[in-house]
Amino acid sequence: MPQMANVSVSNNEYFLERNKKGGKADAFEFTEGEDEKYPDGQIARETIKLLNKFKDSGEPFFLATGFKKPHLPFCAPQKYWDLYQHTDFSGITNKEKPAGAPPIAFHQWQELRGYTDIPNQGALDAQKEQDLIRAYYACISYVDVQIGKIMKELDRLGLRENTIVVLWGDHGYHLGEQDLWCKSTNFEMDTRIPLIISAPAVARKNGMTNAIVEAVDIYPTLADLCGVQPGTRLSGKSLKSLISNPGMKWDHVAYSQFCRPYKAITAQHPTDMGYTVRDKGFRYTAWYNLSTNQVEARELYDMRKSEVETENLAGQKKHRQVENKLAKMLDAYKQHP
């Protein structure tokens, strides 16, 4: 039986005295101190301790390390903020909403507006936008360093060549693009995630692929790489063959969904659900009324021309064939996910 362990660290995100709004203070904070002052530095430290413990035992292990950043609030040691003191973060690209996109596809940045330094409504001023983006990048650098510490320890302990490592994030992020901040949409920027897999004796060194995969593929991939037979049918697919041959033919698609209204995330029942399917060329979303099961809005975007959706093509005659194809796929997924 593989060894497993839990990491326990401080949950203290803030060190400056500030007014709070619903448990939140400002959207970002940077203070002098070592990495371990904030939770992610502590998480890295405890993970390294566990790696040493597992190394000493000589037995197989499974270790899941979850970092908080770059999730809001953007809090980290001052040195990571200082890294970007000469970086120009002005001029958000693709700031406009996609032409023809239905209102239900958007939200009012409720997650961001919960912080004390963010207005309850209306646009952000240019300086606040730049500060938020800088803080986001600073937190990414902070976590990058913590991951580097862990990988360096794996090498030092001689565990690297016999350990599968998966680096992934649970969602993407908007930083002002498409008139959105944070997540909670079915757009590409919120549903596309980082995914890096190191699998000794299988993965091609520095191999990269543009193949479309899903987060639900991670578990069956790990099971396959470890020679473990899952006890039940899995929704995802093993990526083992793709890892060893990144250029292979791969025609799979990815599905995602998100509810409306926004408050249905935690506080009330949803009235609508947006289901999305993404193939290698297009992104299609259908918004279903959950009471009537009728589609109330449709979105179709050509992702071959831009990494960000700019124009809703749903209903256009010249795109009817691809829309119908994706609509059938989405309906089948909705009935049998």
Image (tube, grey):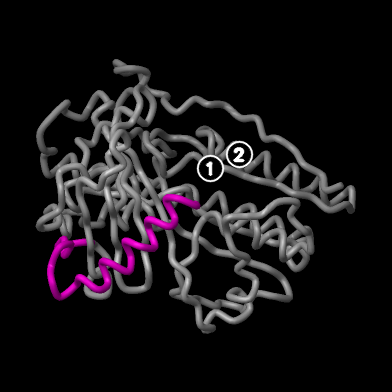
What residue sits right under mark 2 in the picture?
Answer: 43
Q: What's the magenta bit mostly, secondary-structure-wise?
A: helix
Say whether residue 111 is visible.
Answer: no
Is 18 left, or right, of 122 in this rendering? right
Examine the structure image and report whether residue 242 is included in the region drawn in magenta.
no
Question: In front: 294, or 197?
Answer: 294
Lower sequence index among marks 2 and 1: 2
Residue under circle 1? 67
The residue segment tinted magenta is 309-337
Residue 36 found in image quarter:
top right
For label 1, the crowd category at 10 Å Cα-Cα, with few meaning under 14, some 14 to 19 and many 20 or more, is some
Q: Is residue 328 magenta?
A: yes
Q: Is residue 244 above or below residue 194?
A: below
Mark 1 residue type: Phe
Image point (21%, 54%), residue name: 298
Residue 54: x %, y % from top left: 82, 48
Total tally of numbered discs in the picture: 2
